[in-house]
Image (cartoon, grey):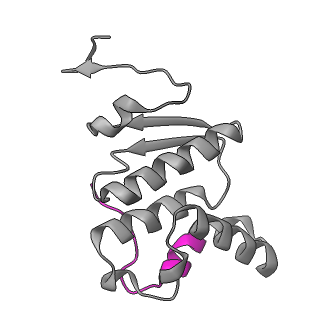
């Protein structure tokens, strides 16, 4: 469960890394960055270095980085593992927004919060590598 963030870089710089190969304009890079930071509720920490963040803040930075290039399919491995309840619920809101945008979201989790979601989804339960439900 590593975030694969660069500890000495700022939140904003970490979020911008996936855009480097795309050679976007500075304006587009900044716009994509701000949108992703806002979605992940981490914009208020944009100038802080990763090493100064809590585990939940690092997780939200990683979420922003994953969203910055506007992917069609989003794979989430234990996305709420280091988040408090409030930020876990905010993440669910992000998932709902992304789903409304036509994104496909795959979530692997043990968090019971996902058992109570009130939007269309398909739940696949697995145990020991076998589908059980």
Residue 38 located left or right of residue 82: right
- At x 28%, y 59%, the residue is 82
Q: Residue 2, located in which quarter of the rendered image?
A: bottom left
Residue 4 visible within the image: no
What residue appears at the point 71 percent right and 42 percent down from the top-left corner? 101
Residue 57 lies in the magenta stretch: no
Q: How many tags in the picture? A: 0
The answer to whether any part of residue 68 appears in the image is yes
x and y, in percent, of residue 53 in the image: 33, 79
Q: Is residue 8 magenta?
A: yes
Relative image position of residue 14 (x, y in whole percent): 50, 75
> Where is residue 120, by image quadrant?
top right
Q: Is residue 82 left or right of residue 35?
A: left
Residue drawn at the location 43% of the way across and 64% of the way down: 60
Please state if 72 lies on the left or on the right of 116 as rendered: right
Q: Is residue 50 above or below residue 79?
A: below
Which residue sits furthest left? 128
Identify the magenta region.
1-17
Figure check: 77 above or below 49: above
> Residue 105 location, x and y as percent?
54, 37
Where does the N terminus fall, quadrant-wise?
A: bottom left
Q: Is residue 87 above or below residue 12?
A: above
* Residue 96 place in picture, x, y as percent: 58, 42
Quadrant in the picture for the C terminus: top left
In front: 29, or 46?
Answer: 46
Using residue 25 as the reference point, say whether residue 6 is left or right of it. left
Judging depth in this view, the residue of 19 and 28 nearest the camera is: 28
């Amino acid at each position: 469960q590593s975030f694969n963030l660069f500890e000495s870089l700022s939140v904003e710089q970490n979020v911008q890394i996936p855009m480097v190969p795309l050679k976007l304009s500075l304006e587009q890079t900044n716009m994509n960055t701000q949108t992703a930071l806002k979605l992940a509720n981490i914009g208020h920490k944009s100038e802080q270095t990763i090493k100064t963040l809590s585990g939940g803040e690092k997780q939200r930075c990683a979420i922003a980085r994953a969203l910055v290039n506007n992917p069609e399919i989003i794979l989430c491995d234990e996305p709420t593992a280091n988040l408090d309840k409030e930020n876990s619920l905010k993440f669910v809101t992000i998932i709902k927004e992304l789903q409304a945008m036509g994104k496909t979201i795959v979530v692997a989790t043990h968090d019971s919060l996902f058992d109570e979601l009130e939007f269309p989804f398909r739940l696949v339960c697995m145990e020991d590598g076998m589908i059980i439900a």
